[in-house]
Image (tube, helix red, strand yellow):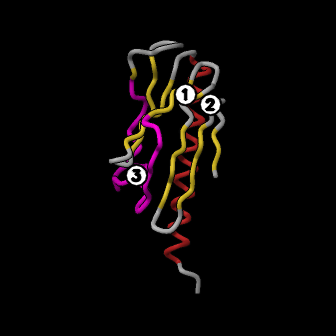
Amino acid sequence: FPDVRKWVENYRVKGTIRQLITDLQFTKLKAVSEGVQYRVTFNNMNETYIIEKGNAAISSSVWTQQGITRELTNSSNPYHARGIGLNANNNSIIFSVTGTASPAATIAVSGNTYTKNVTVLLTGRVRYE
């Protein structure tokens, strides 16, 4: 019999990646459609991330959280992913009104056995590796 725990972990990692990619693409589209910067800010210590709206097309000085905090470790949060960790190499990714991203980033999504990466390129392209 295959190890069911590994299968479940892989399923949770992939589900978390799908949600993260959806959130990153949504954030980019909001920046383009609304004409202001948007960013995704990561907290690696708490394994959370938030989506924030800027107040300008360039060099936003005020950021307002949009929606709820995505908390992977909180079982009462709709974004909960038991046993799955999140580690971004940059604290935040800002999407411009043209859809480009700054800085480029890699976000590792991992369980005990599997680690997969989501990469955001400077062009704004979101890739799963």
Q: Nearer the viewer, residue 79 or 28?
A: 28
Question: What's the amino acid at mark 1?
Answer: Ser
Question: What's the amino acid at mark 2?
Answer: Leu
Residue 40 x, y percent position in the rendering: 47, 33
For image coordinates 66% across by 35% down, the residue present is 125
**Label 2 packing within 10 angstroms: few (<14), some (14-19), many (20+):** some
For residue 59, above or below residue 48: above
Q: Do tag 2 and tag 1 residues touch (Cβ < 8 Å)? A: yes
Q: Nearer the viewer, residue 106 or 52?
A: 106
Highlighted magenta segment, given as a residue range: 64-91
Sequence-earlier tag: 2 or 1: 1
Residue under label 1:
102
**Label 1 packing within 10 angstroms: few (<14), some (14-19), many (20+):** some
Sequence-earlier tag: 2 or 3: 3
**Label 3 packing within 10 angstroms: few (<14), some (14-19), many (20+):** many
At mark 2, the secondary structure is: loop
Sequence-earlier tag: 3 or 1: 3
At mark 3, the secondary structure is: loop
Q: Is residue 40 magenta?
A: no
Residue under label 3:
72
Of circles 3 and 1, the one toward us is 1
For residue 34, above or below residue 29: above
Question: What's the amino acid at mark 3?
Answer: Leu
